[in-house]
Image (spheres, helix red, strand yellow):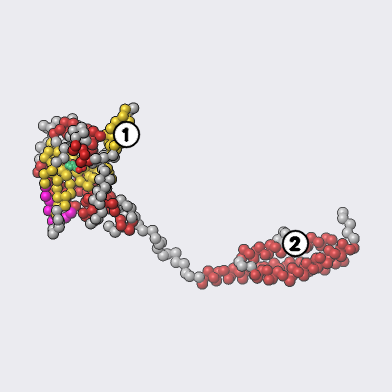
């Protein structure tokens, strides 16, 4: 047990007395000067907390002489009560002030609709694709699909392009090196969706009627040609199909897309996989003729290449550019605009 002498006890009493006076004189300003509730609580802790000034001072109490202890003890307790009462009052005042500030601030209306999130919509080419598929499905055509990288022979030879024939130059493309089961195979980024004709006929027995939309690739690159664009291929195979069916189906289709008052014109043209082959133009009242698709009666050689008997089966095929239809229908002057993904442009349709 420490043995305190009279001088030490006196010093403790003095320090304590001075301390109580100092704290009593300063706490109000500190509390009132706090910026917010958090700061107020911090100031309170600096006085009354476990390491607070008053708490530290009270540790001197045990060194104070008995004769003074009662009086100093009462003063200390009174000050402690006074401070915590003032803290409570100040806290209430702070909270009231904060609440009032909140109530007088600009009104928050949680029922207002959210800002800035426009609803997305389908790309014009996708919309055209859906529209065309709807028309052909209503006529009984199935939707078929094929890969964008396909065998060179599905893209050319099986469709009647002789090997290295200059006709293939009409569709110059990107060649892709591929291996299948350890062998090098000639593959290309398909130049047209006509590859799907070959694939479907190799897969299925006639009769059949399919349409196949998809991306195709060529070296062309100008305001009306993009190195990647979209086509839709059609193929119908049955017994005794004539050019009359071809004309009937395509006329009906084009008038559904562009309007029933649209004129449709068939012109002879050459594609290796059809005979006869043609191109079709459309004209809106008062407008100019626009070339819109290629078509023809399936060439007997193509039937032979896929194992169909050309004496038993006949059919017609056609191919069109979805981009082209989108450009004509929506009045898009430059095909590139469809691929730049500028939302300001795309959302104008
Ligand atoms: N494949 C042709 C092209 O890309 C379009 C085409 C023409 C498709 C005539 C056909 C067709 O099926 O019969 O230019």
Residue on which disc 2 sits: 55
On the image, the x and y values in percent for residue 224 come to 23, 51
What residue lies at 71% left-to-right and 64% top-to-bottom?
A: 47
Residue most extreme to the top: 182
Q: Nearer the viewer, residue 153 or 329?
A: 153
Determine whether the residue tagged by mark 1 lies in a helix, strand or loop: strand
Q: Residue 258's mark?
A: none
Mark 2 → mark 1, Cα distance in angstroms: 84 Å
Quadrant including the C terminus: bottom left
Residue 28: name its quadrant: bottom right
Neighbour tally class for label 1: few under 14, some 14-19, many 20 plus, Cα within 10 Å: few
Q: Nearer the viewer, residue 92 or 104?
A: 104
What residue lies at 64% left-to-right and 66% top-to-bottom?
A: 40
Residue on which disc 1 sits: 177
Q: Nearer the viewer, residue 149 or 57?
A: 149
Verify whether residue 264 appears in magenta: yes
What residue lies at 50% left-to-right and 70% top-to-bottom?
A: 105
Residue 232 left/right relative to 344? left
Verify whether residue 308 appears in magenta: no
Which stretch appears magenta?
Answer: 258-266
Q: How many marks?
A: 2
Above or below for 331 versus 241: below
| Residue 19 visible in the shown view | yes
On the image, the x and y values in percent for residue 177 come to 32, 34
Mark nearer the N terminus (2 vs 1): 2
Q: Nearer the viewer, residue 173 or 12?
A: 173
Quadrant including the N terminus: bottom right
| Residue 252 visible in the shown view | no
Tell me whether the residue at label 2 lies in contact with that at label 1, contact meaning CB atoms closer than 8 angstroms. Answer: no
On the image, the x and y values in percent for residue 123 come to 30, 52
What residue lies at 13% left-to-right and 43% top-to-bottom?
A: 269
């Amino acid at each position: 047990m420490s043995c305190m002498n009279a001088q030490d006890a006196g010093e403790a009493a003095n320090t304590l007395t001075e301390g109580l006076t100092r704290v009593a004189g300063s706490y109000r300003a500190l509390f009132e000067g706090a910026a917010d509730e958090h700061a107020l609580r911090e100031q309170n802790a600096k006085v009354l907390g476990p390491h607070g000034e008053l708490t530290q001072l009270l540790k001197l109490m045990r060194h104070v002489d008995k004769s003074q202890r009662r009086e100093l003890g009462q003063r200390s307790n009174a000050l402690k009560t006074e401070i915590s009462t003032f803290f409570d009052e100040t806290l209430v005042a702070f909270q009231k002030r904060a609440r009032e500030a909140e109530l007088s601030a600009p009104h928050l209306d949680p029922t207002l609709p959210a800002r800035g999130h426009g609803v997305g919509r389908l790309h014009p080419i996708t919309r055209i694709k859906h529209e065309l598929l709807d028309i052909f499905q209503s006529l009984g055509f199935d939707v078929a699909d094929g890969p964008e990288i396909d065998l060179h022979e599905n893209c050319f030879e099986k469709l009647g392009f002789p090997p290295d024939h200059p006709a293939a130059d009409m569709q110059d493309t990107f060649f892709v090196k591929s291996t299948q089961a350890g062998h090098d195979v000639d593959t290309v980024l398909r130049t047209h969706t006509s590859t799907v004709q070959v694939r479907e006929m190799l897969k299925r027995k006639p009769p059949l009627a399919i349409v196949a939309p998809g991306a195709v690739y060529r070296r062309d690159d100008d305001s009306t040609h993009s190195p990647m664009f979209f086509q839709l291929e059609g193929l119908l195979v049955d017994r005794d199909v004539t050019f009359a069916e071809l004309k009937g189906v395509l006329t009906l289709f084009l008038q559904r897309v562009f309007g029933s008052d649209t004129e449709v014109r068939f012109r002879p043209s050459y594609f290796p996989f059809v005979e006869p082959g043609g191109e079709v133009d459309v004209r809106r009242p008062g407008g100019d003729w626009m070339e819109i698709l290629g078509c023809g009666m399936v060439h007997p050689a193509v039937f032979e290449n896929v194992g169909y008997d050309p004496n038993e089966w006949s059919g017609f095929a056609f191919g069109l550019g979805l981009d082209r239809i989108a450009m004509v229908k929506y009045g898009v002057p430059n095909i590139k605009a469809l691929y730049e993904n500028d939302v300001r442009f795309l959302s104008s349709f």
